[in-house]
Image (cartoon, rainbow, N blue to C red):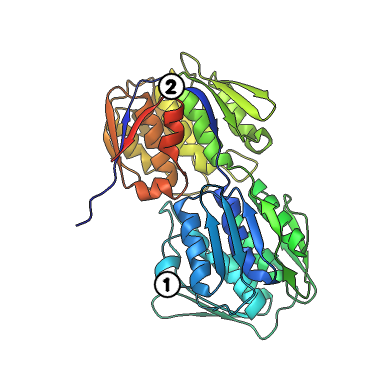
Amino acid sequence: MASEEVLYVEGGQALHGEVVVQGSKNAALPMIAASLLATEGQTVLHRVPPVKDVLVALQVLRELGARVEYDVERGVAVIDASGDISHRLPEDLSSRFRASVLFVGPLLSRFRRAWIREVGGCTIGSRPTDYHYRGFARLGAEVQGIAGGGFDVVAERLAGSYMYCDLPSHTGVENLVMAASLAEGESVIENAASDPEIVDFVHLLQKMGAEVEGAGTRTVRIRGVKKLRGAEHEVMYDRLDAGMLMMAGAITGGDIRLQGVELDHLGIFTAKLQQMGVHTTQDGDWLRVQGPQTLSPINVVTTFYPGFPTDLQPCIMALACVAKGDSYVRETVFENRLGHIKNLRAFGAQLSPEKDNLVIVHGPARLKGAQVRALDIRAGAACVLAGLAAEGRTSIHNLYQLDRGHAYLEDRLRNLGAKLERL
């Protein structure tokens, strides 16, 4: 049996120093998929983070037949998908991460066929992909289920259409934009997600020759073009990695400087931290984050962008555990995104789950080091924060989940004075 990597955290160190935010995982993944749309030239992406999901996505491209070079140190991926490409996604890889569904749109768009097994990812609740496939059908594709789960999507031709998302889905919009980019005529996507990662992704598509308007709003319009070519683009910084690092400074009462925080992308989140007593100061490319001696309690309701991000909910709940007074955290996006309550209780936190995914956090708790398991990317990040604030030693298992979203996390936290060791 293979030995497991474990992250050990010695708590009680106030963080100080400077650290750089990684490139955005959630912007890089659809860009990697979009490289399949280019029939000529190379797609060159800068600031691509070497997180597990990105490494798997690049391997999917290789197995489909694309030529891929990835310089991990410089964060540069060079992709040439102009040759023979398979329409059939590799089963063993696509089942490992949810973003594999993003390859369906570009494969269908360029080759009029895509075959995929059911996708994997974080088990945080229902994340239906039916509106991806409903959108493909409205463009003229025939969507057939395959034995054992998954879909075979085939089209003789794709024609512009009216499409919609029942809920503003990040990957749904990206997939439908890619599917419509080479269709005949104009398409509209209503109730689209407006996340900054979608805007950044569309900037790449526009450089490739796509005609897309309205990214960042609830209505996106796509005029189909004859062909797309490779382009060069720098991936935005990761606002979720930034938020996690800001909270690491805050929960330890530290004083840190971060490069790569786009405060425009973290408006409500930053305002909530300020309500907790955290001081933030922008200085050119750098953001200074100063944690108070005592954090104040908070009320948080997660919702779609530009609301409070569901992906930062587990971490701010960790902060609430040590805040002075009762905090109220309501999760409205994913019905199963409260698994980290069990982990936080292991540290000694006092939490009362109420109905309708509301959690009352009774602070301040005196957190003690614990042995915990990262249930998903963000729950794992919450364990790291609790470990940084706890007395004694914490061991975090199932690091694959943490590595899916954060690259070199222990190295970057060590640069801030945290005591961490991966064994």
Q: From mark 2 to mark 1, how far is it between C-alphas?
A: 43 Å
Furthest residue toward bottom: 156
* Along the viewing direction, whichever of 417 and 376 lies nearer the viewer: 417
Asked if residue 82 shows in the view, the reply is yes
Q: How many marks?
A: 2
* Along the viewing direction, whichever of 338 and 27 lies nearer the viewer: 27
Q: Position of residue 354 (x, y in %)?
A: 40, 37
Residue 344 is left or right of residue 50, and the answer is: left
Furthest residue toward left: 1
Residue 60 drawn above or below residue 48: below
Q: For the residue marked with disc 2, what is the amino acid?
A: Thr
Q: Position of residue 248 (x, y in %)?
A: 46, 28
How packed mark 2 is, by other alpha carbons closer than 10 Å (few <14, some 14-19, many 20 or more), is many
How packed mark 1 is, by other alpha carbons closer than 10 Å (few <14, some 14-19, many 20 or more), is some
Figure quadrant of residue 18: top right
Q: Which type of secondary structure does the marked residue at label 1 adopt?
A: helix
Identify which residue is drawn at 53% across, 33% down.
300
Q: Are marks 2 and 1 in contact (CB under 8 Å)?
A: no
Q: In the rendered image, which residue does mark 2 sit on? A: 252
From the image, which quarter does the N terminus lie in?
bottom left
From the image, which quarter does the C terminus lie in?
top left
**Residue 91 numbered tag:** 1
Q: Position of residue 407 (x, y in %)?
A: 47, 44
Furthest residue toward top: 293
Figure quadrant of residue 318: top left
